[in-house]
Image (cartoon, rainbow, N blue to C red):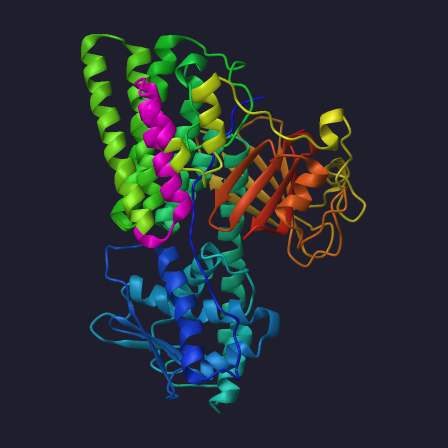
Amino acid sequence: MRRRALLLLVIITTWLPLGAGDTVMEKEATARAVFERLVAARGDNRKPAPYFVFTSSKRSGARSEGNRVILEEAAYDLCSSFGPEAEAALAGMLAHEIIHYYEGHSADNTAIGLVGDAGASQQETEADYLGGFLSYLAGYPAANVMPRVLRSLYEIYELPDTLTGYPPLSERIALADRTFRETRELITVFDMANVLTVLDRHAEAALYFDYLLQIFPSREIYNNAGLVYVRAALPLFQPSSLTYVYPLELDLRSRLSGQTRGPAVDSLTRAFYLRTAGEHFERARLLDDDYAPALLNLASTHALLSTSLVEGSPNSLSREIACDRRTEAALRAREAERLANRLGQSLTAANARMILGILAGLQGERDVAERHFASAAESPLAATNLSVLRSGKLPTPTSGPQAAGFVMDERIAGNTMTDLRLGAGAPQQRIQVARGGIPVQLAVLPPPAERTTLLRHAAGDEPQELMVAFIQPGYDGTTALEVAAGADRSAITAEYGSPAYSQLTAGGELLVYPDSRLIFSLREGVLTHWILYSEE
């Protein structure tokens, strides 16, 4: 099977449960944690981060005013009454105001609020649309809560249905509902982009990320897009050139099955891919110079460019430039380690030390490499690269029932993916992701059961399509081996064995089982939902 790469998109976050009965200080601390998580997900240092203010006054529910985002206690209490959707409601409200700030809607200390200090209708629509996507990127569930938030705010603040500067309440609710559907479209594109990335469909994944970057140019999306290009470059190396496993991948399978199409073509193509990846990582850093994953990935890119130079043209000039690339890789790795340590991102720091170990190993400094690998024990790649250094062999992954050829059909409400493909109804929505070149269309199909989403991706004139089913949190069912939401990682691997590869994302970790066409999505080590796919 082909090699797989690890998509490093890590956001370290903590949050507290919402409670209307908390003290004012506890409410402020909880709201501030949500606010800071959203600002971190925006990751845009082109402007200073806004200040958060929590107040007991009742003026506008929540508002953006100059360089401040202001949340009123009454609005917090309203969100806390939403039960399971309380976090989504608070995140949606704050994300709406954060977008106002970053898009410059509230410049010069102009106030724009939810039920006071009216802004332009286009600004409100934009804040709803991009705020919903920002909330999703920060890891909060996508929920159509803004209509309820607006209705409740009018009731709690005892406001008439028609306010000066705002459309009537009924129109605002209808607009919020429509905007949520448009936000779902953006989320759908993002979800499919990540699945395409996991499945190594590089050209198509790049088109999806290009689509997203036109609308929401965040550091995470630039980082994801950059890693698509790195992953596309990896199969273009001679297998003997990639001795170690970079922090870009967690695949423990043999590389010896890889074949290239010709040294000259592969050398030029992979260099182009790697340079393009580096440009994306630099853009992510321009948005946020405290974004350690981009530095880490940039270090790996420089290291791979060094290897590419030597393999493609092993003359004295190429070797000199390759040496400069290795020096740059080491500098970026050390910078990433310092930054990650300062921010408490221990896994990213460990992976930075992993790169330093790889560089030392490539230069024949075995003792130095071993020390770096040993100090990076928290990284999933530590044992792998130590094994390569000491014995030249990759460790053998644990096996589950699949290893003996026992693979059960995964089902949704009794239907296999083949059943769903044959019985799929007319699309509920079509999204044109790209035109010309490789035309790409994403179709949203009727869901096979509650709490599920069914998508169909088609690119170019190829008859082969990719169908993907997302089994969302709250689905009343299990996998074929009776794994359900809430299971921890060990429970999954006990049934399915080690994943073929693992990938970190903004929402947590993905465990991928190609034999079963199954992807588990974990958050903090616990299964939240899973994905089935069919490439027939």
Left or right, residue 221 beside residue 21: left
In the rendering, at what x and y percent does residue 235 appear?
46, 20
In percent of the image, x 41 and y 8: which residue is there? 262
- Give the camera-side residue of 163 and 12: 12
Location of residue 326 in the rendering, given as x and y in whole percent from the top left corner: 26, 25
Q: Secondary structure of the magenta portion, mostly?
A: helix
Q: Is residue 71 above or below residue 457?
A: below
Q: Does 253 appear above or below 111?
A: above
Outermost residue toward the right in this view: 414
Q: Which of the 4 image quadrants contains residue 468?
A: top right
Name the image quarter holding the N terminus: top right
Q: From the viewer's side, name the closer residue of 422 and 241.
A: 241
Would residue 408 be found to the left or right of residue 40 on screen?
right
Please say whether residue 357 is one of the residues in the magenta stretch: yes
What residue is at 31 percent from the left and 45 percent from the top? 284
In the displayed structure, 352 sits above or below 364; it is below
Say which quarter of the image contains residue 59: bottom left
Q: Quadrant of the C terminus?
A: top right
Provide residue 165's location: percent of width, then percent of height: 37, 81
Q: Residue at x 51, y 71 (%)?
A: 89
Counting from the top left corner in percent of width and height, residue 120 is at 34, 72
Total numbered labels placed on residues in the image: 0
The magenta segment: 342-371
Q: Residue at x 70, y 56 (%)?
A: 475
Q: Is residue 153 above or below residue 492?
A: below
Task: Specify whether residue 310 is in view.
Answer: yes
